[in-house]
Image (tube, rainbow, N blue to C red):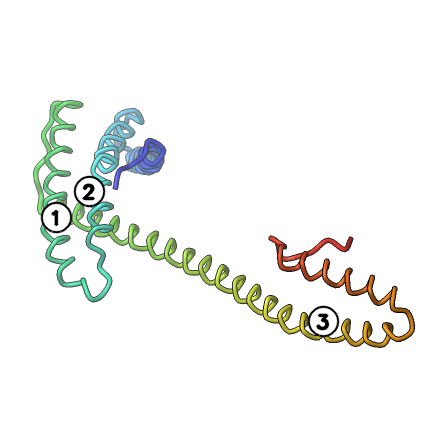
Amino acid sequence: MRFRLSTWLWIWAAWTLVGIFFGTTLWLNYVAAGRESSFRASLTVSLAEWWIWALLTPIPVLLARRWPLWPPWTARALLVHVPAGLGVAFLKAILERFARIWLFGVAPYLLPNNIVRHFLMYTALVGATHAVGYYQRSRERELEASRIEAQLHRARLDALEDQLRPHFLFNALNTIAEVVHEDPDKADRMIASLGDLLRGTLEREGPTIPLA
């Protein structure tokens, strides 16, 4: 499944907001601790970190859609997501290391807790993808249920119309049978009108017939 431009824009916008939030939080922590701080540097570090996640987001999203964790595919999906999550975690750490070197000339250590943190972020993205997919399927089921319910109402209406037509025809014929003895010409016109009505009913295309 390809990501459209609008999807990419939403991904970058979301991670940018996250980066601004954590960059501001980092700067405020330095200020509260009385340490020398630079809002620009804090924001740059944070945005670099979260923009890397924006670049990597399609990987867990596409893998989660291709191998969902729903039964009975849970075990097979785990065999995909565990190594993929570790791979994304190491890739994130390496890209973040290069970004720090490029921005500040300092290379951070590849600490195990960072790998674990990145792996947990991968699992969070997989979980978010599953949540969105569950919501979409729920909406599709609701729409399908509404469509089936509408078809059921239509079928009930059609059945009611099919029941009414014979009664109407019998009543019309009984009326004509009574009139034919008193006014044959009127009965003849009634038969012709009834024939036109039945012909129009058979030729109708919609669920209603004009009163005229």
Q: Secondary structure at mark 1?
A: helix
Question: Seen in the image, is 40 located left or right of residue 169?
Answer: left
Could you tell me if residue 116 is visible in this image? yes
- Residue 124, image x and y in percent? 25, 51
Q: Quadrant of the N terminus?
A: top left
Tags 1 and 2 touching, CB below 8 Å: yes
**Kind of residue indicated by mark 2:** Ile
- Residue 87, image x and y in percent? 10, 44
- Residue 24, image x and y in percent? 34, 34
Identify the residue position indicated by label 2 in the image: 59
Q: Residue at x 16, y 57 (%)?
A: 77
Q: Secondary structure at mark 3?
A: helix
**Kind of residue indicated by mark 3:** Leu
Q: How many C-alpha atoms fall within 10 Å of the one at disc 2: few (<14), some, or many (≥20)?
A: some
Identify the residue position indicated by label 3 in the image: 169
In the image, 42 versus 163, the foreground residue is 163
- Residue 212, image x and y in percent? 78, 53
Mark toward the viewer: 1 or 3: 3
Residue 84, label in figure: 1
Q: How many C-alpha atoms fall within 10 Å of the one at disc 3: few (<14), some, or many (≥20)?
A: few
In the image, 33 versus 98, the foreground residue is 98
